[in-house]
């Protein structure tokens, strides 16, 4: 359930948890800087090629991947969406969002709330590859990611 969007949580998980415990739960999430998030998706997709021959990224540069993402239906056509709608809707917003770069603050929050030590193992490490963008493509990408960038900027 760690990848449950806020809408699904409120529609399915929260009612079940409330019925089981009679308690309300605080929702928490990590949000990555949007362009870095896309870089991570790109590297992840490259790694997937090793396991899934139908999922070919052979010869697709990050510049091309970012260009595809910036197209009108790019996020959906790539099957990765975007972060803001995952974390907030008109009706709901994750209670506490931490910047991925502040994972230490996230761990401290969890340890305080759960009253135990939390260790997050490093898993799903993607390959190191060139993920540079031309300034023009980065600007176009940032325009596409406006909603994500605004949410990210609002995180304390």
Image (cartoon, rainbow, N blue to C red):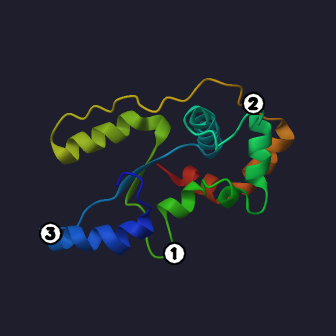
- Front-most of residues 63 and 114: 63
Residue at screen point 71% across, 31% down: 131
Quarter where residue 151 is shown: bottom right
Q: Which residue is mark 1?
A: 90
N-terminal of the pair, mark 1 or mark 3, is 3
Which quarter of the figure is the N terminus placed in? bottom left
Does residue 109 appear to the left or right of 87 in the view shown?
left
Residue at position x 74%, y 43% in the image? 65
* Label 3 environment density (alpha carbons within 10 Å; few <14, some 14–19, many ≥20): few
Label 2, on which residue? Answer: 132
Residue lying furthest front: 53
Name above or below for residue 9 compared with residue 139: below
Mark 1 to mark 2 CA distance (whole Å): 34 Å
Mark 1 vs mark 3: give the one in front: 3
Q: Quadrant of residue 5?
A: bottom left
Q: How many marks?
A: 3
Kindly report the distance in space between the C-alpha atoms of the residues bearing marks 2 and 3: 48 Å
Q: Quadrant of residue 22?
A: bottom left
Is 13 situated left or right of 30 in this image?
Answer: left
Per the image, label 1 sits on a secondary structure element best described as loop
In the rendered view, does 130 fall on the left or right side of 25?
right
- Residue beneath the point at 27% across and 44% down: 110
List the residue tagged with mark 3: 20
Q: Earlier in the sequence, mark 2 or mark 3?
A: 3
């Amino acid at each position: 359930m760690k990848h449950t969007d806020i809408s699904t949580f409120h529609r399915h998980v929260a009612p079940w948890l409330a019925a089981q415990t009679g308690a309300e739960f605080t929702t928490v999430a990590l949000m990555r800087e949007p362009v870095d998030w896309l870089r991570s998706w790109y590297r992840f997709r490259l790694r997937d090629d090793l396991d899934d021959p139908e999922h070919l990224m052979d010869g697709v540069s990050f510049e091309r991947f970012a260009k595809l993402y910036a197209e009108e239906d790019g996020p959906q056509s790539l099957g990765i969406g975007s972060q803001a709608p995952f974390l907030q809707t008109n009706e709901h917003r994750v209670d506490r969002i931490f910047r991925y770069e502040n994972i230490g603050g996230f761990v401290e929050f969890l340890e305080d709330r759960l009253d135990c030590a939390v260790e997050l193992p490093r898993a799903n490490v993607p390959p190191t590859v060139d993920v540079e963008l031309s300034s023009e493509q980065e600007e176009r990408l940032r325009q596409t990611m406006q909603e994500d960038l605004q949410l990210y900027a609002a995180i304390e």
